[in-house]
Amino acid sequence: MANPEKQNKWKAIIKVLIGLTLLSFILAGFFSLFIDTDFESLSGNVALIEIKGTIMSEKDGDFLFEDVTSSTEIRKLIKKADEDPSIKAIIFEINSPGGSAVASDEIANEIKKTNKTIVAWIREIGTSGAYWVASSADTVVANRMSITGSIGVIASYIQFSGFLSDHNVSYERLVSGQYKDIGSPFKELTPSERLLFQKSLDKMRDYFIEEVAKNRNLKKSDVEKIATGQFYLGSEAKELGLVDILGGRDEAVEVIEKKLGIEAGIVRYKQERGLFDVFGDVLSRQSFFAGKGIGNSFFTKAKLSNSVSIST
């Protein structure tokens, strides 16, 4: 018969070993975040600002562990670079599918205020609101296989009135104002509500087209023809006038060096990061190394409310 004391002793040892393993696993991740193999200079004359993930006005709990670019933070970085006399140019490294129309417009407007030379470098993807931002740059660089374009606006929400009806649940509508509960998931849109939404979306699309046409020196009528929401490869986008140069970071740097006659030294400007951002990166990185395939995003929280998601 096994000795209970010995069993408890071995259980305690196993628990300690598991705890130490997990601790070393997490600490290794933290250290790896601060050891950059790119070894970019802490000082330089060209600021590199990253536009990554969904573009929103602010980061919030609904995007925990997901890549989010805050327009508030990016505007601060642009102002910081613009006010630094040692910074001669700014490169925006874009890897984003877009996001909030307001947040995209805020970043684009801030770019236009700066006196620095601006280059947008679209890496994997720079569509919709992210392309709105890119179009505000002096020069747009993209890989021939980058995904860009997708000029348009989308609105959506979850509507489950049919589900409620099937389960004998009714929606008692008590409002003061015809459109007070427009977009409620508990009822279908009326024809007039749908028309109201569509008018707003069409107006936002028109703003988008006007900005791209103005930023890219294109005729509005030409931009309207390609503003179908379709995405384009970098090579196709260049033919359409949406991209200037096919290439990557080296080509973006080369544009600046030729235009300003300087030798570029890159300094990375980063968004402020909270504890959840760092912890999320650690878990994401370690999970990837462990072969879990989780990547950067652990979960998406679906919001069932009477709000409608509108994005570029």
Image: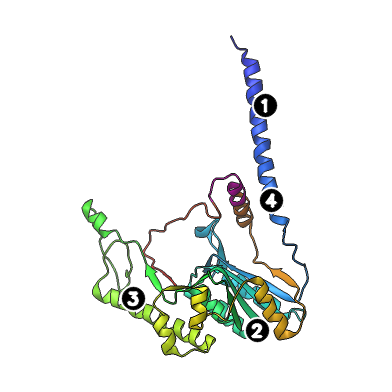
Q: Where is residue 176 in the image (x, y as percent from the top left)?
A: 30, 72
| Of pointers 4 and 2, the one earlier in the residue sequence | 4
Q: Is residue 82 left or right of residue 207?
A: right
Task: Residue type at mark 3: give it.
Answer: Phe
Which quadrant: the N terminus? top right
| Of pointers 3 and 1, the one earlier in the residue sequence | 1
**Residue 10 within the magenta-colored segment of the rendering:** no
Task: Residue type at mark 2: give it.
Answer: Thr
Q: Marks 4 and 2, how far apart in space?
A: 35 Å
In this figure, which residue is indicated by the disc labeled 3? 197
Figure coloring: rainbow
Q: Single out the mark in the foreground, 3 or 2.
A: 2
Question: Residue 53 occupies which quadrant of the picture?
Answer: bottom right
Q: Where is residue 183 in the image (x, y as percent from the top left)?
A: 33, 68
> What is the number of the mark on residue 114?
2
Give the residues drawn in magenta, as a range.
284-294
| Residue at image coords 38%, 58% | 304
In this figure, which residue is indicated by the disc labeled 1? 13
Q: Position of residue 218 (x, y in %)?
A: 49, 89
Label 2 secondary element: loop
Packing grade of label 2 (10 A; few <14, some 14-19, many >=20) is some
| Residue at image coords 33%, 77% | 198
Label 1 secondary element: helix
Packing grade of label 4 (10 A; few <14, some 14-19, many >=20) is some
| Residue at image coords 44%, 89% | 220
Q: Marks 4 and 3, how far apart in space?
A: 46 Å
Task: Residue type at mark 1: give it.
Answer: Ile
